[in-house]
Image: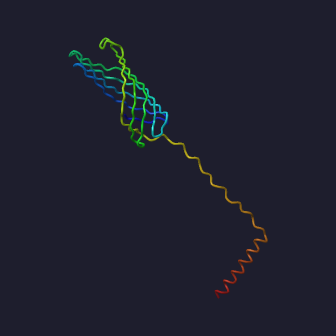
Amino acid sequence: DLGKTLADDFELQLNLGHARHNENGNKIQQSIAGLDLLYFFSRKEWQPYFLLGAGAERDKRLLANVETKKTSPEGAAGVGLRYMFGPSVGVQLEYRHVTGFFRNSATWGFPRSNNNYVNLGLVFPFGAEPPKPAPKPVTPPPAPKVEPRSEEHTSELQSRFGISYAVFCLKKK
């Protein structure tokens, strides 16, 4: 299956499948192609989901050496479990029920086909991961509060600086 993430909980997948049954020289084949909408209950490593889908099925049968072929619309519903090995590849196991709606029921003798499938497949999500919420801005801590110097403190520093400067100059000469 090929898929595209639509939102955190939803994904769109292309579903392709083929099944066949042979019994006493009679053959029945069914190929399906459709789009599935998956709803995920979790997006952790193990991801259970529910699916709804729609597409087309191609039915072909050979009964008593008479071949019949027809393409019909189909709908699907199912449940599955996906395991992701990383962000770009995973494996999923699912059960789906597919109902085909025959346009000419006289061809088949009944108006619908109802089939149950158990699928095991690889998953290759396309596109970027859904955007993550922006991190909250970090506000820097307030600057330390500096108290203004008193006049006495300032003159004391000036006099000390002047004395050391004078000593420095005397030594230099």
Figure check: 171 above or below 28: below
In the displayed structure, 35 sits above or below 132; it is above
Q: Is residue 6 left or right of residue 101?
A: right
Q: Residue furthest left?
A: 65
Expressed as whole percent of the image width and height from the top left, the position of residue 29 reads 28, 23
Query: In the rendered view, would you say 50 is above or below 67?
Result: below
Residue 127 quadrant: top left
Residue 121: x %, y % from top left: 36, 34
Quarter assignment of residue 107: top left
Front residue of 131 and 111: 111
Q: How many numbered callouts? A: 0
- Judged left or right of residue 167, residue 73 is left
Q: Is residue 32 left or right of residue 25?
A: right
Q: Residue 66: x percent and y percent?
A: 22, 15
Q: Quadrant of the C terminus?
A: bottom right
Which quadrant of the structure image shows residue 15?
top left
> What colour scheme does the image use?
rainbow
- Residue displayed at 70% across by 83% down: 166
Placement of the N terminus among the 4 image quadrants? top left
- The spot of residue 145 in percent (x, y) is 71, 60
Looking at the image, the residue that sits furthest to the front is 24
| Frontmost residue, 119 versus 160 | 119
Q: Is residue 157 above or below residue 89?
A: below
